[in-house]
Amino acid sequence: MAFFFRFHKSIAFQRFSQALFVTLLLFVTHARADDGYRLWLKYDRLSKVQPILNHLQSITIPSDSPTMKVAAKELQTAIKGLTGKNLTIQKTANAGSILLKINPTEHVNAEGYHLSQSSKNLIISAKTETGLLYGTFALLREIQTLQPLEKLNVTSSPKVQYRLLNHWDNNNGTIERGYAGSTLWHWFDLPDVIDPRYHDYARANASIGINGTVLNNVNASARFLTPEYLKKVAALADVFRPYGIKVYLSVFFAAPKTLGGLKTSDPLDPEVKRWWAEKTKEIYTLIPDFGGYLVKANSEGEPGPQDYDRTHTDGARMLSEALAPYPQGIVMWRSFVYKADPNGDRFKAGYEEFKPLDGKFDSNVLVQVKNGPIDFQPREPFHPLFGAMPQTPLMMEFQLTQEYLGFATHLAYMAPLFKECLDSDTYAKGKGSTVAKVIDGSVHGYQKTGMAGVANTGSDRNWTGHPMGQANWYAFGRLAWDYTLSSEKIAEEWIRMTLTNDTKAVATIQNMLVNSRETLVNYMTPLGLHHIMGNNLHYGPNPWLAKNVRPDWTSVYYHKADENGIGFDRTESGSKALHLYAPEVQKQWDAASCPPEYLLWFHHVPWTHPMPSGRILWDELCHRYYAGVAGVTRMQQQWEGVKNQIDPEIFENVKGKLSIQHREALWWRDACVLYFQTLSKRPIPEGLEKPTRTLEEVKQLVDVYQIR
């Protein structure tokens, strides 16, 4: 005892105690810290477990197929984490089981599912094993978001067939317009080394119903079609297959010439057709369930059929014929085609290229159309092609990566943007012919339907750079499955599964998310302004940009601001782009009734134009820019208010991003207000604080950023 007493008093013991305390503190902190890797598949212990979950003992699966194995493993892992219970896996049903069963008579489509509860069992039924997998994740979503299970009765089927992520990833590891690190695909290691992250990527996609992935950039490299790379692609296909995910490739149109050694890549040349047929056969030998091809042709310098005086249908038919022996194979031909025309209107380009081709594509071709007519702007009217091609399946293309919405530093929840487009009425067959009903085949009877999202994922540990960027990945998948879901519901699901189940915190964060995109529009492109961002990088403000390699890559081309007013006249007196829409749509966007949000998209109006708010246009423009900055301040305050309910690591990450966003919202506000003021010659309205820097100082900041 005396020895212990002396040791206790010794310096050595004090140091030991201090070291032990620090070690324990670090351990506890590390144990709690969340780096975002688990996404919304976080299976942390529930504070209160529903009774039926306490009765569970087993998981019953209909077979030992790879898909059923991953479903059972997911359930086993999730229930262990959420409740602490270890469930066995079996093939014979008994009480206290999560029962997965094939039911050919279930009222769902091939990928749909039905969730129910019977006695002490939770039941997932579907027509296919893929449907059971989707049902598995749906059941876990019900549990994670604390939905009552006593009277569980949920039936759901996807509304479109092809629900894809488009990765703009390059074979050198970079990602075009990627802001979350480098590519997920370790091309130099494949096919020999399979990163466990590939499985987690597949899990995440399957959990929200995504069933396809285009692995490479639309500005494609022919190298992806070499035997070397096709083996790598096949290795990824093997990983994704049990999760119901098919792989697709973007193709370089000139590959027969650059890779095959032919003298031409003319789509009507018999040797070129033969080359594509043989290459396609080679792919299907390695990947029997290969999904097909995505094509960017004759756009922004990419080669295409027009290089040989052929049409887009000629090019698409060459590939569709190569895929014809493989019924599951499709061609997705992008409509993002526009030529440099200083006297034209880029708004009309895609419509003018593809509308005349309606009905001329083969049945295994979908035309992939961006949500708006320019290029993924913070707000755009829906693309006029939607509703205008009744004989050609149109596939939606959204962008999850925030090329024009602040990269991975600005919080911008995209579900409201997606919904704004999907819910827009084309009036193609009268009222109710929404964009969503066009692409799901309801309006025109398309036999093939699809929705694609340009991925925002990368090698960053949290997948998307900004922790909140995960919500856009999640929202895209949920809306591709069911476009009737509200932005608010999707946000609540994601928050509860990813951040917290605290009721007040959920409501606060939901409000942040749902309003974040409108806040961003206000400080970037209010009242229908568009394409006024930094050159090339597409980051930061640059409304004064007047010279570039082509006119439609400048800002002045779009805002047309002068001493008389601002905005692009697309009416009868201007480019007539408004005429591309149905008469009912034209009426809602005409001069008399155009909502403020779209005003400068379609009209060049005086600075003194009266607005619904009672202000003149110039004053309203200023107020919108200032409201955007105030909106970011409000988000900062809201986030600070939920600090105690959020993991410390995630909290600090988002807090730092919001600080950047506030600084850059001020940058946008000052740049645009000061620049447009030189043209309007009007004062900043009373009550709004004047910028503390000059226009020249802001321009220097932009120039420095572009150099970097």
Image (cartoon, rainbow, N blue to C red):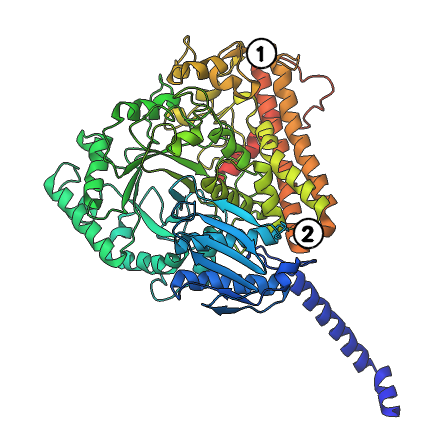
Q: Horizontal placement of 199 versus 444: left or right?
A: right
Q: Horizontal placement of 605 versus 641: left or right?
A: left
Sequence order check: which comes first, mark 2 or mark 1? 1
Marks 2 and 1 sit apart, C-alpha to C-alpha, by 45 Å
Is 470 rendered above or below residue 461? above
Q: Is residue 410 visible?
A: no
Dot label at residue 70: none
Which residue is found at the position 54% from the left and 30% from the top?
A: 541
Mark 1 lies on a secondary structure that is loop
Residue 452 is situated, as x and y percent measured from the top left of the image, at: 40, 40
Residue 218 is situated, as x and y percent measured from the top left of the image, at: 34, 42
- The kind of residue on which mark 1 rests is Trp
Between residues 48 and 153, which one lies in front from this camera angle?
Answer: 153
Is 153 rendered above or below residue 422? below
Q: What is the crowding at mark 2: few (fewer than 14 residues within 10 Å), some, or many (at least 20)?
A: many
Callouts 2 and 1 close, C-beta under 8 Å = no
Could you tell me which quadrant the N terminus lies in? bottom right
Which residue is found at the position 30% from the left and 24% from the top?
A: 355
Between residues 208 and 122, which one lies in front from this camera angle?
Answer: 122
Q: Which residue is mark 2?
A: 646
Which residue is found at the position 50% from the left and 27% from the top?
A: 532
Q: Which residue is mark 1?
A: 607
Between residues 617 and 491, which one lies in front from this camera angle?
Answer: 491
